[in-house]
């Protein structure tokens, strides 16, 4: 039913996925983490994850940062994909609201060279 | 091929029904883009039973119809990018004759997720979207295998149906 080439293909994809995972794991910076929000590619704001807060993004989305993780609580878009997205906490993870072009991602100061916090 | 339009209508209806069935399954991983893709079962079968042009037409019609009925404009753009890339990859692998139905479908599943991810990257102009690439690669592989094995089983049973 399965040919040898099928297994080679599957192995190649799994290997590629593992390689990317390993790269992500080792390039992850330690220390304090921040939530960075961009709208349509432009920076909207950066917030510490150690502080619980609710961020309103242009009246289209509402993000909640609580106990070191962040989740999209509300969005005005029809598909609600970002609202169903699980809470994010690890460096590099992100929530995207495609209709509103909002990208929320977790960053560590070491990897981004961030030296100040814009509020 | 005889009765081409009639067969095409039946396959489109079948794919649309499977899209609807999929919306009934609560299958959420918290990461967008991971789903079974039941409708692709029909696309894979049509690819093997007729040719890649029929399958492409079916895939596009299915995405447009399902998008207007169950989804939104954004889900259409997402699915279209994934569906078209997936079909082209499957057509090439099917023609090469080096892969089984399951292998072709696995490559299709992976290509589908890559296409969707690329669309998201362009739409929000951020490379960070790529974070979930490993998860989506594995998910595409797994769902593609399930769909491929099912399609293989169906193809064996409709061997006598001549659509070429």
Image (tube, grey):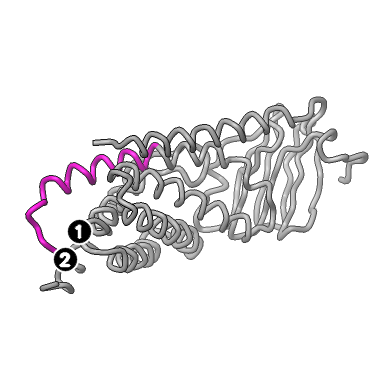
**Total marks placed:** 2
- Residue contact at pointers 2 and 1, CB within 8 angstroms: yes
Q: Residues within 10 Å of mark 1 (few under 14, many from 20)?
A: some
Find residue A83 and report its image quarter.
top right
Report the disc number at residue B164. 2
> Magenta residues: mostly which secondary structure?
helix
**CA distance for labels 2 and 1:** 7 Å
Read off the chain for label 2: B
Q: Quadrant of the N terminus of chain B?
A: bottom left
Read off the chain for label 1: B
Report the disc number at residue A10. none
Residue B163: x %, y % from top left: 14, 64
* In the displayed structure image, the side of residue B10 where residue B76 appears, left or right: right
Mark sitting earlier along the chain (2/1):
1
Residue with the mark numbered 1: B49
Find residue B145 and report its image quarter.
top left
Q: Residues within 10 Å of mark 2 (few under 14, many from 20)?
A: few
Taking the spot 46% from the left edge, 50% from the top edge, the residue there is B111
Magenta segment: B142-164
Taking the spot 72% from the left edge, 41% from the top edge, the residue there is A54
Please determine if labels 2 and 1 lie on a single subunit.
yes
* In the displayed structure image, the side of residue A3 where residue A65 appears, left or right: right
Taking the spot 67% from the left edge, 32% from the top edge, the residue there is A23
Taking the spot 55% from the left edge, 35% from the top edge, the residue there is A17
| Front residue (pair B19, B41) | B41
């Amino acid at each position: 039913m399965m040919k040898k080439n099928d297994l080679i293909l599957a192995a190649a994809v799994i290997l590629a996925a593992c390689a990317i995972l390993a790269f992500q794991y080792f390039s992850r910076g330690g220390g304090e983490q921040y939530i960075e929000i961009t709208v349509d590619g432009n920076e909207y704001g950066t917030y510490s994850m150690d502080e619980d807060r609710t961020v309103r993004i242009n009246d289209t989305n509402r993000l909640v940062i609580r106990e070191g993780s962040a989740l999209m609580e509300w969005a005005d878009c029809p598909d609600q994909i970002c609202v169903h997205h699980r809470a994010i906490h690890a460096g590099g993870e992100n929530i995207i609201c495609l209709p509103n072009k909002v990208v929320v991602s977790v960053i560590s100061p070491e990897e981004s060279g961030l030296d100040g916090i814009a509020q | 091929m005889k009765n081409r339009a009639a067969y095409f209508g039946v396959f489109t209806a079948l794919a649309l029904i499977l899209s609807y069935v999929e919306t009934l399954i609560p299958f959420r991983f918290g990461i967008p883009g991971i789903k079974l893709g039941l409708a692709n079962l029909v696309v894979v079968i049509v690819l093997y039973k007729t040719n890649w042009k029929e399958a492409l037409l079916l895939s596009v019609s299915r995405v447009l119809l399902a998008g207007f009925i169950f989804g939104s404009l954004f889900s259409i753009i997402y699915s279209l990018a994934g569906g078209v890339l997936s079909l082209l990859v499957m057509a090439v692998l099917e023609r090469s004759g080096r892969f089984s139905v399951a292998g072709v479908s696995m490559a299709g599943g992976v290509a589908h997720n890559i296409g969707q991810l690329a669309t998201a990257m362009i739409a929000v102009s951020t490379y960070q979207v790529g974070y979930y690439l490993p998860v989506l690669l594995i998910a595409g592989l797994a769902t593609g295998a399930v769909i491929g094995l099912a399609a293989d089983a169906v193809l064996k049973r409709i061997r006598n149906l001549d659509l070429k």
